[in-house]
Amino acid sequence: MKIPKNLKKLFLLILVIILSELTIFNFRYYEVKFSGLKHNSIDMYENNLVVDKKEDNYYKKKYIIALNDKVKGIKINLKQKDTNEEINIITKFKDESNRYTYKTLDEVRYMPKYKNREYIVLNSQKKCLLMELEMSSKSKFNLDSIELNTWYFEFNIFRVSMILLISSIIIFKKEINSFFSKKSKAKIITYICFITISTLIYSYYSLDYHTMYENCKYDRGMVFKDIYSEFTRSLINGKITLDFKEGDTRSLSVLNNYHDYSERVHVGESYIYDAAYYKGKYYCYYGITPVITILLPLALLTGRVFYSNLICIIYSTLIMIVLLKIYLKLLDKLKIKFGFLLEFLGYITILLTMELFFLKLIPNFYQAVDLCGIFWLLFAILQILNLEDNKSNTIKLFLIGVSYGLMVLTRPLYIFYIVPIIIVIWKYIFNKKSINWKNGLVFGVPIIIMAIFQMHYNYSRFENIFEFGQRYQITINDTSSLKFDLGIVINGILSFLFNPPYITRHFPFVGYNNAGVNNGNVIFTEMMFGILWHPFILILLSIRNRINNNPKLKRLKLITIVLLLASLIQLIVDITYAGIIQRYLSDVLPILTLLSLVYWLIYLNESKSKEVKKDRLKIYKIVCLITFIMMSMFLYISIDPRLLDIGKYKSIDKRVINYVITHSLEFYK
């Protein structure tokens, strides 16, 4: 019986991958196993412990161990009170090559649940004379023993599966594209399956999110609430203030400066973290759209108040759907046909470049704001793409107006998008001879109504129609005193644009760099991965040639200039009043990504030469692949390993709170 050629290929592929897993991916095991170095276990004694203290809510210990062996790797055996809590380990050693200088390794984040975290590569050049282990954790721990020259053997099913999947796609590319070209329904089913599976995984991942907010307090007076959930409860009870049963809501008012985090800690008053505080009352200063579109209607229908993770689940799914429609619509309008694999890769690349999956990592009210705003922005863009000449566009213009109003009610910074929207719809409202009042009213009235609502809502909370509550935020920094600072803004823009990754010895071999801001003023900053490290967006660097060479793109040129200016203004406002963190790039990445997509597609389509089109298509493939790899690595290093276990435990309060608040405290220090 003849074995089909493709089956032979698949069998050979599986065999090569399994052999690679058994050898290449376990090379460290064989290196240590056959190094000829003796395996030795060293029990820890009290005289090894030179530092043992508790500082800033961390248990800190330092161990010094005298040795006289060549060491390739060590295994640490720890006893820990809370096995969910990570231990940060800095390893230093001296060897005979330079016995007066410590060689310092990268910090290791030890977690007992992950086998590979127990092992540290040492690679002393000659005999190791002295080893120093500096450890810190939120949980009590003891170092029981260390094992010299030992390593683990692991057959990683997940790694094998991923390599097999990617390799199969590459090897059977023609067959896959041929299958999908013949069966158009299979393409739709694949997209539906991808969105459904992504939503189900995310839903499971955020399953126990709500438990962290139930009777949960954080030390130093912070009470961490799901602001949107609390606000929904307030609206049901006919008020816009947030209830605060844990303490006297007037107590902060007696402080000299209740915005000062240090003063709040010193006095020990309890307060709602990241709410707005004005004249003795707490308010939600985040955009109201997620509540009035998701949580409030569900609460009225079911009698149950849900949490922000539900907002994130619903809106992230809607974003994937509407973005797919935009993507396919653009391909259709520009008459571009990709093979299915390239088309699908392009879609995933756009999702990754927009950092949708990054926003989904922690499903709380911070991300709920961003996801909601992005959806209504994309929904407006979809309706714009659906506008048709010489046909009735009344409903579409109405939906654009509603979408714009809802996106501004979510993120006030989106107000700048009114200019490019008007440029696009101008011809549907104004022409040379007359004004189409019907189109103008259906577009403008929803915006005016929502603008009046927002001003009334602002005045009801802060007695100022133009005050959204940012100045009254109770957080790590004193937001009431923040103002425009040219030095900080320039440094912040440079960080948002250029901040590069750094190279590390551990998979995926890259890490974040700190935002490059140090002007003597305290604003919230964190690790950054700049815009120009999103390769898909780099096409914007060549937009001048793309536009100038094509007289049909004058309006696109104007829209591009306006959108780039709007993006710059948004980033400046974020830097001035909020800080410099990766999440704030979501204010501009969706627009920059779609602009880049449009220019990529124009670039692919504008040449009539088949050879030139072929070359440009190759460039597009390469850029998509590089973007996919880089953004996947970026996503991987963004995931706190503790969060991978969400859904398996009854409570996740410590893990998520530590991630959201403790990291903030570390940056503040």
Image (cartoon, helix red, strand yellow):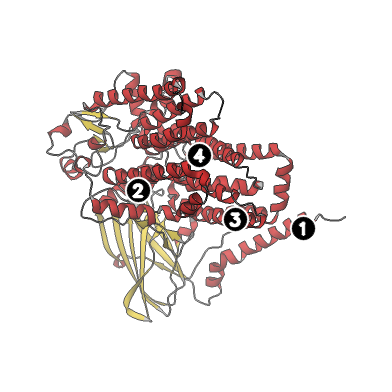
Badge 2 element: loop
Badge 3 element: helix
Percent from the top left, x then y, of residue 481? 19, 42
> Which comes sooner in the sequence, label 4 or label 2?
4
Label 1 vs label 3, nearer the camera: 3
Q: How far apart are labels 4 and 1 at the CA level?
A: 37 Å
Q: Quadrant of residue 363?
A: top left
Q: 76 or 303: nearer the eye? A: 303
Q: How far apart are labels 3 and 2 at the CA level?
A: 35 Å
- Disc 1 marks a residue whose amino acid type is Lys
Percent from the top left, x then y, of residue 125? 43, 78
Q: Left or right: where does residue 22 sit relative to residue 378?
A: right
Residue displayed at 63% across by 57% down:
612
Q: How far apart are labels 3 and 4 at the CA level?
A: 36 Å
- Disc 3 marks a residue whose amino acid type is Arg
Q: How far apart are labels 1 and 3 at the CA level?
A: 34 Å
Query: For the N terminus, which image quadrant?
Result: bottom right
Q: 340 or 216: nearer the eye? A: 340
Residue 581 tag number: 2
> Which comes sooner in the sequence, label 4 or label 1?
1
Q: Is residue 627 visible?
A: yes
Q: Which residue is mark 4?
A: 202
**Residue 176 against residue 62 in the figure, above or below:** above
Q: Which residue is mark 1?
A: 8
Q: How far apart are labels 1 and 2 at the CA level?
A: 50 Å
Residue displayed at 40% across by 24% down:
444
Q: How far apart are labels 4 and 2 at the CA level?
A: 23 Å
Residue 616 tag number: 3
> Which comes sooner in the sequence, label 1 or label 3?
1
